[in-house]
Image (cartoon, helix red, strand yellow):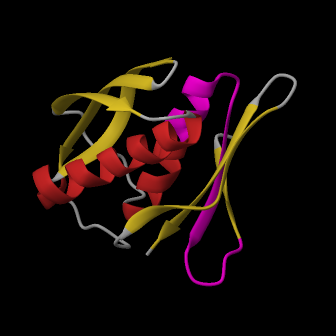
Amino acid sequence: MRYEYLEHTADIKFQAFGKTMKEAFSNSAYAMMNVIFEEKVREKIIKKIKINGIDEKSLLYNFLEEILFLLNTEFFLLSRIKKIEIKSKELTAELTGDNSKEYKLGLDIKAVTYNDMFIKKEKDKFTIQVVIDI
């Protein structure tokens, strides 16, 4: 299982999993995007992003916010994360997707929040929890 949605009173809460932090970050992005659009998105556009943060949590927050920013400003709907690298306080990624105007989108995400956010490393997996404001 890549991610699961949890009970939350007003917003959307999910946990994403991965064998590595990179995989868990990617699955967090997929969980967030699945709230917006549940079908397969064509891979017509490539975007390269570079994100900085003061720690892992801020890096995750900034990564998810950048994906939302691309959707809201450039109409870029994420399909797949082709490559992702996390080094200290920097993340670089190559994303593929399509123009969101060609799809009927579901819920509108207002923002990613720090509320209840965590990144946990257990024996052989990472667990990330995020709450998004809808």
Q: Quadrant of the C terminus?
A: bottom left
* Magenta-colored stretch includes residue 60: no
Q: Nearer the viewer, residue 113 or 84?
A: 113
Residue 58 position, x and y percent, is 50, 43
Q: Quadrant of the N terminus?
A: top right
Q: Nearer the viewer, residue 83 or 115?
A: 115
Residue 107 visible, this angle: yes
Residue 27 position, x and y percent, is 55, 39
Q: Quadrant of residue 22?
A: top right
Measured along the vertical axis of the image, is residue 3 above or below residue 44?
below
Residue at 36% across, 46% down: 40
Q: Nearer the viewer, residue 28 or 80?
A: 28
Q: Quadrant of residue 50?
A: top left
Q: Residue furthest bottom?
A: 9
Residue at 12% across, 60% down: 101
Specify the segment rendered in magenta.
7-27
